[in-house]
Amino acid sequence: MRRNRRTLILTLVVTFLLMFLLTIFTVGNIYKTSYNNVYEVGSDKTTAITADLEKYLENAKSVLWVTADTVDHMLAEGATYDEIVDYISRESYNTETQFDSTYTGIYGVINGKYADGLGWVPPEGYDATQRDWYKAALAAEGQVIVTSPYVEAQSGDVVISVCKTLSNNNNVIGLDLTLSGVQDTVEDVQINGTGYGVILNNDGMIIANPDKELNGKYYTDYPETADLFDTALKTGEGNFTAVVGGKNCTVFVDQVLDQWTLVIITEDTQLFEAPRSILVVSVIVNLSAFILLAGFYILSYQYEIKANKRLDEMKALEQQKDYEAKLLKLEKTAADTANKAKSDFLADMSHEIRTPINAVLGMNEMILNKCEDEEILDYASSIKSAGKTLLSIINNILDFSKIEDGKMNLVPVEFDTTVLITGLVNSISERAKAKQLDLIVDVDETVPSKLYGDDVRISQVIMNLLTNGVKYTEEGSVTIRVQNQGINGDDVNLRVDVIDTGIGIKEEDMDKLTKSFERIEEKRNRHIEGTGLGMSIVTKLLKMMNSQLEVHSVYGEGSSFGFNLSLRIVDHEPIGKFEERRKSIYKKKDDTGRLNVPGLRVLVTDDNEMNLKVAANLLQFFSVYPVLCTSGQGTIDLCEREQYDIIFLDHMMPKMDGIECLEILKERNLIGNATVIALTANAVVGAKEQFLEAGFDDYLSKPILLDDLEAMLRKHVPESAIVSAPVSAVENKTQTQAVPQKEDDFEVMEFNPEGVSDTGSESELTIDKARTAGLNVEEGISFAAGDEGFYLEILRDYAKEAESKCSKLDAFAKSKDWKNYNILVHSMKSASKTVGAADLTEKARKLEEAAGNQDADYVLANHEELVNEYRDLAKRLM
């Protein structure tokens, strides 16, 4: 402790000495530099004023030289006295006009007679040859001289004369200058805001002084400043110090054309005020720095004392901390391993479950569209509902990983409250019925009919709660309750509760409820299916929606799960009685159970003819026979001729993509009241926001599913367009559109509702042949609305296009035209997905991504494999 104190004192002393020496050195240099700078400023100022005065006198001398030479020449040529007077009169006027009023006129003595350029007539007895200026000019023997100030006979002003003799030494030309300009210069003289100036001639006469009464007098008449000006005249150029009026002063001196001396006198206290201020500030800054350093040293010393005091305690805990660090490392490793296992599990489960489910749903879609047995149709509807629920659950499980990684985004849309609740009830009702549970639906009649929010995530939350309620309830009931807890302007506070009469939750198990992969009373509930992720997903999704889950449970009696959501109201109309509302929504389906909108005017644009054929056949289910177009330019031309109710517009097309096409349609006001829906095979997170931001009203992912298409139509078709009975297909065939060809060679296709005209070898293509070729036939049929014949027709088109598309891809790859390569391989990906060519779909997807990123190496390395596989598949099919 004592040694530390001595170290502190020594440090402070050494620091002070170093700071002191540093202060002396830096301040000395700064002060010296500042002083030198002041002298430089003074010298520069003196030189500048001298230059101005010299310029002033030089201008006068130049005028005089020119005039004298001209008069000399005129005399040599025999000019008369009057001619010379006329000349100097003109020059006097020109001089005053060109310069300023300080030039008072040209005059002189010509052949013994006085001549005046201003027309002044001397009084009787005036003898110019006796004037000082005349005598001074004669004495100068042809040189230009500047006289001492004198009183001018004509005006009575104090002037100086610039004079010169002519070739005949008795002839003299002169120019008078008033001292007002020189006087103004002297009165304005200051250096660093202080001082005054004086101009002396070589005889000691004061030419200009701030005190005008001294002008024209000799400095020797004033003893108090005689020594000062004596020294100034002797110095000639430079500076010196002197005591003036009892004050220390610095005097700056400079010569003006060797005839005048400029003297500037400044008081040192004012002249060197800035350097002294810098000196004081520097000392204060360095002193402050020392005080801060000293304070820092003292605080550090005090901190060191405390640190040393704790050092022994820390050493005692060191082994424990090492142990804890190792334990944390082991826990982190275990957590990382668990996370990897979870991710692998989710990925594997997605792949393994999706494939058979797609097959089941595809075959089930065929049953729904071909079977007429009502009981079987009822079973098929249940299969469809359960299958969709299962796919939704798989997606929800995968969403858990996205939520944890921060990649989950909410996508708010307008949704019908009744449709959302009905979907939930339909999805859970069969499971409740299987366990002989009562499913109670309690919906507040004042709930608004249409809201704005992420309906997918809201359904996901409620579905998880309903699923848990059914799973953990053996007898009794499961209730879904939806309440309006208050409307504030355009926002409603929606309350949702799921209540069951199940096994309940113990108080000590509440913490496990929202943990990932944790299940309550696992031994007791081991027969109940589930991953343990449901409630974790619920709480995380609710947090994203600014809500939280409220749980109330009595072990052995049941549980209640609820949450509040603030949602924007789209339609304030109350939902009314739920069951009546639900029936009214679906009562306008036609005899097949599908939406029936025969008068709907629809335009579908896609550069892939196979996609157009799929869209047209699916729209036929709703008595819609669309106009089909293969390019953006064609869409523009069609919209110039006709108005449509709905425009399905593909995103990725050559020459003009969907977004560019939409921009032009809007610029030209061609959309009218049409709803524009984007078609895209890139149904990724954020895609919907991208298209809505670009101006689309909605978007639909490809391959198009029949139910997705129906949902889209229900969302955007006005209720007035829906009819209760199907209209004859023949009456609604689309007529061929006669549209002029454009540079991008678009094509307007006629859709034939009868759909089939197979000839030749094409008839040999069968479902078995497609399955043998390695296609996922069930998935392909599901994209063809469950129609095997239509699927085979699509497949024929897919095979026929192979050589054309592959040749174009070869050309784009060879020319490294990655933009068009990206568009075409995107189209190939979509078409391959539609027919169930999974391997080709994945390879095309990777090449599309690489082309979009300008990754030439990857594209060139994998291009051949893709086109060869496509060509080989086409040969096996045909």
Image (cartoon, rainbow, N blue to C red):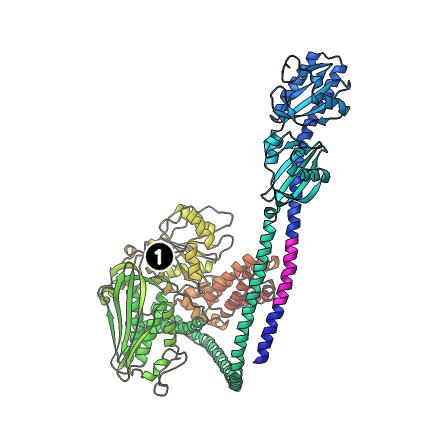
- Residue 309 sits above or below residue 840 on the image: below
The picture places residue 197, in percent across and down from the top left corner, at 62, 37
Residue at 73% x, 13% y is 79
Image check: 674 left or right of 328? left
Quadrant in the picture for residue 565: bottom left
- Residue 416 sits above or below residue 440 on the image: above
Image check: 562 left or right of 628? left
Camera sees residue 366: no
Please tell me whether residue 24 belongs to the stretch shown in magenta: yes
Name the dominant secondary structure of the magenta segment. Answer: helix
Task: Identify the residue position indicated by label 1 in the image.
Answer: 624
Q: Secondary structure at mark 1?
A: loop
* Viewer-proximal residue among 825 and 874: 825
Image check: 421 left or right of 356? left
The residue furthest bottom is 523
Camera sees residue 98: yes
**Amino acid type at mark 1:** Val
The picture places residue 184, in percent across and down from the top left corner, at 59, 33
The part of the chain drawn in magenta is: 16-32
Q: Residues within 10 Å of mark 1 (few under 14, many from 20)?
A: many
Quadrant in the picture for residue 230: top right
The picture places residue 322, in percent across and down from the top left corner, at 53, 84
* Viewer-proximal residue among 452 and 625: 452
The residue furthest front is 223
The picture places residue 90, in percent across and down from the top left corner, at 65, 18
Residue at 55% x, 59% y is 821
* Viewer-proximal residue among 109 and 365: 109
- Residue 510 sits above or below residue 491 on the image: below
Please tell me whether residue 730 belongs to the stretch shown in magenta: no
* Viewer-proximal residue among 422 and 630: 422
What is the quadrant of the N terminus in the image?
Answer: bottom right
